[in-house]
Amino acid sequence: MIVVFVEGPSDAETIPILLRKTGQSLKVKPKRRGWLTESVKVIRYIKALQEIPEKVVVLLDSHCSDPIEVKKIVRKNEKEVAKELSIPVKYGVVIHALEAWLLSDTLALEKVVGGIIRSIAEPEKDCKPDEIMKDIFRKNNGQYSKTFHAPKIAHQSDPNEISKKCNSFREFVKLVEDP
């Protein structure tokens, strides 16, 4: 079993949908934003699991921070966690937020929104993809709700489309797949 720690309930609901489509099965555990950057807390979360996983992946959003700087922080955390635990623990960074991944599949988004959407060539470029998502819904007479719409978009999404536009998604899938 692979366990993935994510930031918040909408990510916890959406990530398994996207990964199921890649053939991966896992348990996703939501945690509060910011807590996953503290290696002491991650170690505590892992030790509190009822079943010892074969691997843990910690997935953080960069939230307008430089993804390279966030990756430096998480590499340090990986080393600290590795000193304390015998199971592999890897960190992944979503460039800015999960909505970047969801914005990458225009057809999936159109099915959920019910309108024609302009394709976004590089969804990870804008540091507030959730604002882009809100604008898309607003232009189509709707209101975006992360917990309601993100899983719906994920159900319609093609992981291959996401992979074409989002390096962080490709890296995350690889973290989950690699031993």
Image (cartoon, rainbow, N blue to C red):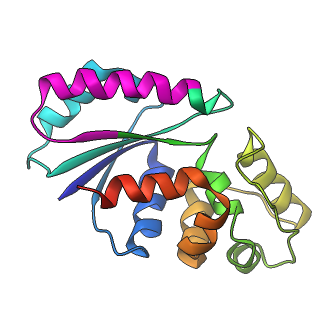
Magenta segment = 69-90
Left or right of 142? Residue 16 is: left
Left or right of 12? Residue 122 is: right
Whether residue 35 is visible, yes or no, is no
At 85% from the left edge and 54% from the top edge, which residue is drawn? 135
34 or 24: which is nearer to us? Answer: 24
Residue 76 on the magenta span: yes
Residue 59 on the magenta span: no
At 58% from the left edge and 65% from the top edge, which residue is drawn? 163
Point out residue 17 in the picture as x, y percentages from the top left corner: 44, 69
Whether residue 7 is visible, yes or no, is yes
Magenta region's main secondary structure?
A: helix
Point out residue 157 in the picture as x, y percentages from the top left corner: 59, 74
Left or right of 51? Residue 66 is: right
Q: Is residue 3 above or below residue 79?
A: below
At 12% from the left edge and 33% from the top edge, which residue is drawn? 47
